[in-house]
Image (spheres, rainbow, N blue to C red):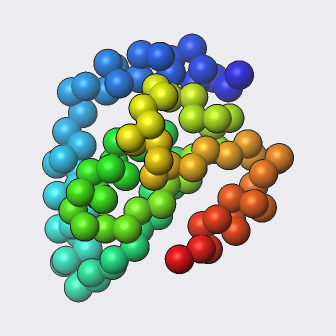
Amino acid sequence: MSSFGPVAPFYDQLMASVPYSMWVSYYQLLLAHQDIYPKRLLDVACGTGILAELLHAEAYEVTGFDLSASGEGPADPIRNRRCRHVRPRRDFRRSLQLLRQP
């Protein structure tokens, strides 16, 4: 179990006040300021997948990538469908291949 393990069951509760929607708006503002309008995004260290889902709701094609053992965050199947959790040494190469898929 990683150091995140003991916190995992409480993650959503601990992060309830985080303004994720504001983060998405700020991210879009930064991209627009640089005249960058991507269709596909990679959410590195996606955790429970909250940000990946919000970005998907904004019409981005999102792939999340996290090195936690098996999605140690809350097992929310809706959010975790966009976030792939990998074991660093065991299936890192396989995960990189998944990220290359269209």
44 relative to 47, above or below: below
Residue at x 47% of width, y 42% of height:
80
Quadrant of the rendered image containing residue 29: bottom left
Residue 26 visible somewhere in the drawing: no
Residue 30: % across, % down:
23, 69
Residue at x 32% of width, y 50% of height:
53
- Furthest residue toward right: 90
89 relative to 48, above or below: below
Q: Give whichever of 7, 48 is nearer the camera.
A: 48
Residue 30 visible somewhere in the drawing: yes
- Furthest residue toward front: 77
Position of 46 with respect to 22 (left or right) is: right
Residue 16: % across, % down:
25, 25
Residue 55: % across, % down:
29, 58
Residue 20: % across, % down:
24, 43
- Image quarter where the N terminus lies is top right
Q: How many numbered discs?
A: 0
Residue at x 73% of width, y 42% of height:
87
Q: Give whichever of 10, 27 is nearer the camera.
A: 10
72 relative to 36, above or below: above
